[in-house]
Image (cartoon, rainbow, N blue to C red):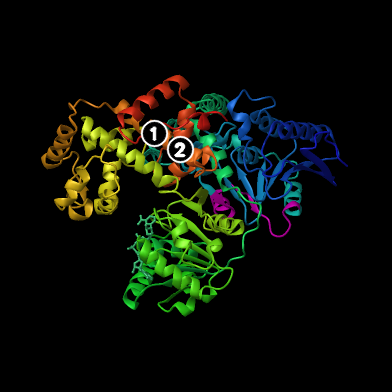
Amino acid sequence: MNTSPIPAVRCHAQNDVLVIEIHNPPINAGALEVRRGLLQAVESLECTPEWQAAVIIGAGATFMAGSDLKEFGKPLEDPQLPAVIAAIEACSKPIVAAIHGAALGGGFELALGCDARVADEKAVVGLPEVTLGMIPGAGGTQRLTRRVGIARAIGLICAGTRVPTLEASRLGLIDHIAQGDLRTSAVQFARQLQGRKCRVAEETVPQESPQQIQKAQEAALRAGRQRPPVVAAIEAIKAAATQPIAQALQAEREVFNRLRLGAEAHALRHLFFAERQAMKPSVDDAPRPFSRIAVIGAGTMGSGIAIASLDAGLPVLLMEQDDAALERGLQRVRDHYAQRVSQGKISVEAATEREARLSGATDWQRLGDADVVIEAVFEELAVKQAVFRQIDLHAKAGAVLATNTSYLDIDAIASVTRRPGDVIGLHFFSPANVMKLLEVVRGRETSPDVLATGMALGKQLHKMAVPCGNAFGFIGNRIYDAYRRQCEYMLEDGAWPEDVDRALQDFGFAMGPFAVADMSGLDIAWRMRRARAATRDPRERYVDVLDHLCERGRMGRKTGAGYYCYTDGKASTASDEAVRGLIVDASVRRGVARRPVLPEEITRRVMLTMVNEAAWLLAEGVALRATDIDVVLVHGYGFPRWEGGPVHWARQQPRSALQCDMEFLVQASGHGARLGNISLLLDV
Ligand code: NAI
């Protein structure tokens, strides 16, 4: 029997229990049709005497993994979720949420509005709205808080934590864990309620000490960088203890509606969709099957890649040029797991299991088992080519051969093998087991199925895999290079390093470019600059402050001084006289009268530079989609997520001012600077 005319929600009676099933693939998002269907189903339940209770369950892989974000940028149509939940609570018969897959955002608010929550062992629940620039808007801040208390609610809601069944049950967010079939278990549970209503909204907030709440609040504000959704969420959660629920629900809804239409939520929704788009395979070909990874070079990157692969359940062979280097690499991996265990992040058993999947070798014969080989040796073409010749000799037919190069030409590396179609770039970021970004670089001859394998491996390693073309710096480093150069011009124009760093940090970057340069070591850039000196056009605007710093032994943090000075690892807040002297000399040589460069000018010039380079990347086909560029900057370069990325930023600017300022900037950047076609980024 199907009592609902709305196909997104289908009802079947199981004797005296009505089963309300949500059908809105792929994630059963709480779209308008679903809300309508649920409301009608609850009305039918109320007026049908044979039915004593109901179960709400999701068809397919999940309960309801969220609201329909596409609806959030405009006025919402009725019935809205709070009305559906109000109807569930007002209904005289109990309604049980049967959760499998995910109950997130509106999905979990719906579940919290029910009289009980039954979940299978593998489900996750959570309220991720804050990470999307909003707060929960259908009672999440009130009902969750009544179950877990204010301090815990602040932690869970402000971080958007996904809580697995077992923990959710411990916290009281799940009332029963289904053994066996979820639907059967939930129907049984609903029957056992014997008509009793158990409204979470009527429960009282558990008592906590003010210190506990204060501590949670401070931690959340710090982690959330005091962003408006975090501040608003804390306020809404605390209202659970001080306001009548009806008033608190109304206030929560108002804040939700204001934030969801604001710039921050708009930017975060943009990224949400951009991330999913980037991860979609860009080719139809199926990936090659892979189950064994070999990593060549067990340095900083190689050991990080090994850890990422072990964490993803793959066996890893780590290879080095000699026993001592191999032992150092293996030890780095072991130390990592020992630290994770001592921090309580993973169990001893999990660490032991992962380490057991790691092996090491210095003998090329061992390479033959690997399905994917990832090279992470020194960044020198000749060294990489020598390694690839060996890989070509020893890897099995059909293995994918990847390089982690940051700047070298993938085709030049592939050319020394007899199988350039199998070669690909997999550009991880440091630390490779932590950073989400993975640029998947296709060479001239890379086969589509090899590209598909790179993307699939990225997914398995829980990375944000972004496809890109083989050009200097790929997407990220190419933009970063242009951005850093622009910051150097600003030094010459009148800014000090700390002015630039502070302005960009205030804009939201994790760190400013000069602090980053000191951290990674100025010598890497210096080496590259010297390598390119012979071919550099003398008419190019070139700022030599970094070279002079290196000549004086100031290589950054590791030598105790770079743009800043370091005592006991702590950076000075301002550059010293020696650095300022070098900067002023550079201005004099350029014939520039130094002037104050204000924070607004600094951030605008940086953004315009990124946008200009992004336009070129798209024109040259290095980036497939404009939005991929935003994903790269946010996940690899500390670009503030709530600004959406440079492309999103550009789309929010008045077009004529953007065009005009970019023309001016390109001119000021001197010989060789080229104006990109921004309509490629803006006209979508
Ligand atoms: P690293 O110097 O820490 O490690 C390189 C390792 O390769 C050393 O342990 C060395 O012994 C080993 N090696 C050298 N020649 C070898 C050979 N013939 N056979 C086997 N092993 C050999 O360097 P790092 O930082 O790990 O960089 C490796 C690669 O990753 C470079 O291409 C670099 O550009 C790239 N990369 C580095 C990033 C970083 O932040 N460090 C970020 C992204 C990419």
Q: Is residue 118 left or right of residue 344?
A: right
Counting from the top left corner in percent of width and height, residue 7 is at: 80, 37
The quadrant where ligand 1 appears is bottom left
Element on which disc 1 rests: loop
- Residue corresponding to mark 2: 616
Magenta region, residue range: 163-183
The quadrant of the image that shows the N terminus is top right
Q: Residue at x 15, y 34 (%)?
A: 584
Q: Residue at x 54, y 66 (%)?
A: 419
Counting from the top left corner in percent of width and height, residue 51 is at: 82, 40
Instruction: Determine if residue 104 is in view.
Output: yes
The question of residue 61 being in magenta is answered with no
Q: Residue furthest right?
A: 1
Above or below for 371 versus 626? below
Element on which disc 2 rests: helix
Above or below for 395 versus 446? below
- The disc at residue 280 is none
Crowdedness near tag 1: few (<14), some (14–19) or many (≥20) residues, C-alpha within 10 Å: some
The quadrant of the image that shows the C terminus is top right
Marks 1 and 2, how far apart at CA = 9 Å
Counting from the top left corner in percent of width and height, residue 88 is at: 70, 34
Which amino acid lies under the numbered mark 1 shown in the image of this protein? Answer: Arg
- Residue corresponding to mark 1: 674
* Proximity of marks 1 and 2: CB atoms separated by less than 8 Å: yes
Q: Residue at x 36, y 74 (%)?
A: 321
- Residue 514, by quadrant, is top left
